[in-house]
Amino acid sequence: MLIFGFVGTVLIVTGLVHLYLWKRLVRDTTRPGRGRLLGSLGILALALVIPAAIVGSRAGAEWLAWPGYLWLAVMFYLLVLLLLLEVPMLVARLWLRRRARATAAVAVPEPALVGMAPPPSAPPADAAGPAERTSSAAPTQAAGRPPAPDHDPGRRLLLARGAAIFAGLTAVGITGYGVRTAFAAPEVERVRIPLRKLGRGADGLRIALVSDIHLGPMLGREHTERIVATINRLDPDIVAVVGDLVDGSVAELGPAAAPLADLRARHGSFFVTGNHEYYSGHEQWVEEVHRLGLRPLRNERLQIVHNGAVLDLAGVNDVNGEDFGDGPDFAKALGDRDPANPVVLLAHQPVVAKEAARYGVDLQLSGHTHGGQMVPFNLLVGAAQPLVSGLGTIDGTTVYVTTGAGFWGPPVRVGVPPEVTLVELRTA
């Protein structure tokens, strides 16, 4: 039901967006005829490609995913660019209309009534015969000509075509750049975070943080291998995989996830569920990652002793797990602990930091946002999450949000390269 509801929402939104694109890219740039008909059919076909890609990719039809998701990215940037062009286009249209009116006023002077004054001996006007009445009505026919147009259709058509070509070429260029970025090796982001309660022995403890790997129809085993190699080169003390590992079942993606067994860390590797695990058979994936050597933290906490200093490491299930009877339980994960020890919480979504703060969490490590994945989509993500990327403070709790190592939907990342974060804890 969640998938059907999601696809229904996508259909409505993409339908409205494609209606706008049709107006700007087809109706405004063509005259009635075969060209407009073909353009209209093309827009309709592209509108149907997107829901087909979403449904098809879930069914393992990779050949449907590529064109649909690529068009989704191009569509997004077309929409952004055309909306940005609305104001200058409006100014240009108003200028063309004003110019056309001024030209018409000079080229077509107002008609004037022309006639001879009646001779002195002429009979009164009310005694005039039929011939005179017919003659005096002639100027009215001249005045009945259609008014000159207040715009130049040719110039307006040229303006619309120029805007469409600019937006189209720019959108395709940005998407191409984004595809190259999305499939590149993850960059390493390094951040030092002071914790007031951190013991001196744990000063410099390193956590390799990765989120949103999104194994699926477009990202497979090679993607996992690159991430594992990147993490192992960092020689971390702890590895934290904070959700959205997969977009598919264990049967489909088990081989793609297998390289996770090669992760190396002094105190082990840990995993918490993200929302996409619940769309992919979360119970089987929890068992699978455990088999691969990652310890799932399912609303639980354990102690890490590093050079004699104690650190509590906790993890909670994703909030979307509530629909599956498997949601976060902060009391279970964080209750009855020694408040003298610092606690680091692994939670997929930054939004739960408000609840974590009530339990005195010192640091929350999250993902989920992809940093917006495609600028300026990050502005919309910011409306749903209190922190889109990087380091921040929410109700007194320090929160770090990694932008993720994979992608979801369009195989595109613009302004937000894939990353693995090395968090170094320091004494305050």
Image (cartoon, rainbow, N blue to C red):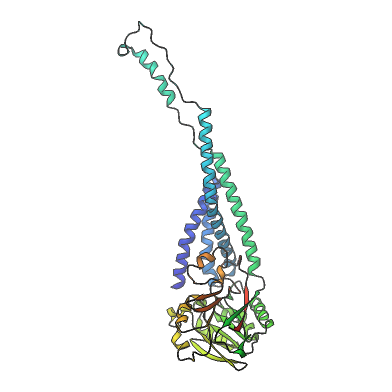
Q: Going by the picture, which residue comes out furthest to the front? A: 428
- Of residues 216 and 116, the one drawn nearer to the viewer in this rendering: 116
Q: Is residue 190 above or below residue 375?
A: below
Taking the image as drawn, is residue 31 in sight?
Answer: no
Q: Residue at x 47, y 71 (%)?
A: 3
Is 226 displayed left or right of 164 in the figure? right
- Of residues 310 and 319, the one drawn nearer to the viewer in this rendering: 310
x and y percentages locating residue 18 in the rendered image:
50, 56
x and y percentages locating residue 412 in the rendered image:
60, 66
The count of marks equals 0
Is 124 displayed left or right of 78 in the figure? left
Q: Going by the picture, which residue comes out furthest to the bottom? A: 308
Q: Residue at x 56, y 70 (%)?
A: 371
Q: Going by the picture, which residue comes out furthest to the right? A: 233
Q: Is residue 58 above or below residue 138?
A: below
x and y percentages locating residue 363 in the rendered image:
53, 81
x and y percentages locating residue 221 in the rendered image:
64, 78
Q: Residue at x 47, y 77 (%)?
A: 395
Q: Is residue 50 above or below residue 219?
A: above
Is 337 displayed left or right of 192 in the figure? left
Quadrant assignment for the C terminus: bottom right
Taking the image as drawn, is residue 106 in sight?
Answer: yes
Quadrant assignment for the N terminus: bottom left
Q: Going by the picture, which residue comes out furthest to the top? A: 121
